[in-house]
Amino acid sequence: MSRMLAATETTAAVLAVTPNSVQALYVRAVLQGREKDFKGADATLQRIGNQLPNLPRGLYMQAIVKQN
């Protein structure tokens, strides 16, 4: 199993139990960005927009997504 697939599955499992987990949503957005799904990443980041300044590289991730 690839690391990306494992990370995606683990993140999905966490979000199934805690759908509003800021950390899990951020990881989902990062994984979406790595897969070049910038529209999906943007939608995910919008769900946690007010928390982005509190996350390491949160605003940086948002800038990358918005640029693409």
Image (spheres, helix red, strand yellow):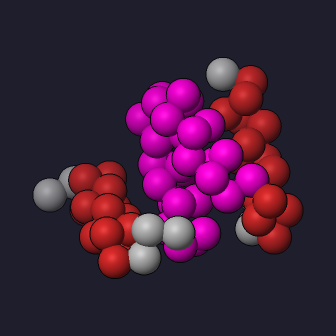
Is residue 59 left or right of 46 when viewed as pictured?
right
Tell which residue pokes out farthest to the left in this image.
Answer: 1
User: Given the current orientation, which residue lies at the most extreme top position?
Assistant: 68
Q: Which corner quadrant holds the C terminus?
A: top right
* Main secondary structure type of the part rendered in magenta: helix
Count of marks placed on residues = 0
Does residue 24 lie above or below 50 as drawn?
Answer: below
Q: Quadrant of residue 64?
A: top right
> Does the magenta-highlighted stretch encompass residue 35?
yes
Which span of residues is magenta-colored? 21-49
Q: Would you say residue 21 is visible in this rendering?
A: yes
- Queried whether the magenta region covers residue 59, the answer comes back as no
Residue nearest the viewer, comparing 11 with 47 = 47
Q: Is residue 3 visible?
A: no
Identify whether 32 is placed above or below 48.
above
Query: Which residue is most to the bottom?
Result: 17
Left or right: where 39 falls relative to 18? right
| Rendered-image quadrant of the N terminus | bottom left
Residue at 53%, 60% (x, y): give it. Answer: 25
Indicate whether 41 appears above or below 52: above
Query: Residue at image x 67%, y 58%?
Result: 48
**Picture quadrant of residue 42:** top right
Vertical relation: 64 (above or below) 22: above
Q: Quadrant of residue 26?
A: bottom right
Q: Position of residue 47 (x, y in %)?
A: 63, 53
Picture coordinates of residue 29, whole percent (x, y) = 54, 49
Q: Position of residue 32 (x, y in %)?
A: 46, 41
Observer-nearest residue: 39 or 36?
Answer: 39
Left or right of 62: which side holds 17? Answer: left
Which residue lies at the image location 48% right of the left edge and 29% below the top edge? 36
